[in-house]
Amino acid sequence: MDGGGSWQNTMKIGLPVIGVGTFQIKDESVLLDTLRTSLKAGYTLIDTASVYKNEELIGKYLKTVLEEVGLRREDIFITSKLSPRDHGHDSARASIMQSLNLLQCEYLDLYLIHWPGKAKLKCEDAKNREFRKSSWEVLEEFHQQKLLKNIGVSNYTIAHLEDMTKYAKIMPAVNQVEFHPHLYQYELLEYCEAQNIQVQAYSSLGTGELVNNTTVKEVAALYGKSSAQILLKWGIQHNVGVIPKSTKKEHICSNMDIFNFTISDDDMKILDGMNMNKHYCWDPSYVL
């Protein structure tokens, strides 16, 4: 991949390569500043979810911030997600409508099933599959109605995706998963690429644990970049989208400053070799 002028800013389905994550940002003034700073810095993807409890605040300020930076709704890409508690036909329908209403959007660019299991169900309960199936049927229905431009999943393993082939009329456009050098899910990435599913990473920095990793810092020093910039670029050079979350202006801006260099093949292999199959967040492989 070229880190220079020929860089393509979007991936499959027009998904921006990099977006702003909003996990745990619930403070009104902080969220407003984050949106304003991000859109001014060139981000066009806003990633939220029902469980983040900030869809209403994003909806409240989005139109104003867009006007400030000279953008229209169609210039940006908004993602939200179905809460694990809302798995199932009726709950999924109500949840999607609520997200549209709270975000004050006529459509969402991408809507994901956030987790392969139903809240309060044991991981080994076979009913998880039934709930996934009924939820996906609702997403397909809303997609056909053009209320959800694209539909996808999050935290799905190869087994979950294979299971989908038995009932899905439309396969997911995106699978958003934890992906970083300590969890280099290359088999999942290869599977998704073969199925034309775009992989998007969350926790690209390993919930912050990888920023001070010695190997990452050594590679970063070679390029005069920060550890965070190297970790984000590593994902992108694996054709994986990234959605770093930060509320600090300098971090928001520096996270975007990753398109003027390319990590060499040798250094990519060094970072790849850090894999420990380590989840810093949640491990979905136990969900039946």
Image: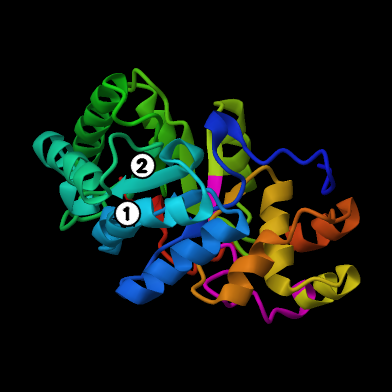
Which residues are drawn in magenta? 200-216
- Give the SS element for disc 2: strand
Residue named by callout 2? 112
Q: Quadrant of the rendered structure where residue 49 is?
A: bottom left
Q: Report whether 239 appears left or right of 108.
A: right
Q: Amino acid at mark 2?
A: Leu
Colouring mode (rainbow / by chain / secondary structure / one colour): rainbow
- Residue 74 in the image: x percent, y percent? 45, 36
Q: Report whether 16 appears left or right of 215.
A: left
Q: How many C-alpha atoms fall within 10 Å of the one at disc 1: few (<14), some, or many (≥20)? A: many
| Residue 163 among magenta residues | no
Residue named by callout 1? 49
For the residues bearing labels 1 and 2, Cβ distance under 8 angstroms: yes
- Residue 198 in the image: x percent, y percent? 55, 36
* For residue 68, above or below residue 89: below
Most foreground residue, 75 or 223: 75
Q: Amino acid at mark 1?
A: Ala
- Residue 153 in the image: x percent, y percent? 39, 40
Find residue 99 and name its label: none
* For residue 43, above or below residue 215: above
- Residue 274 visible somewhere in the drawing: no
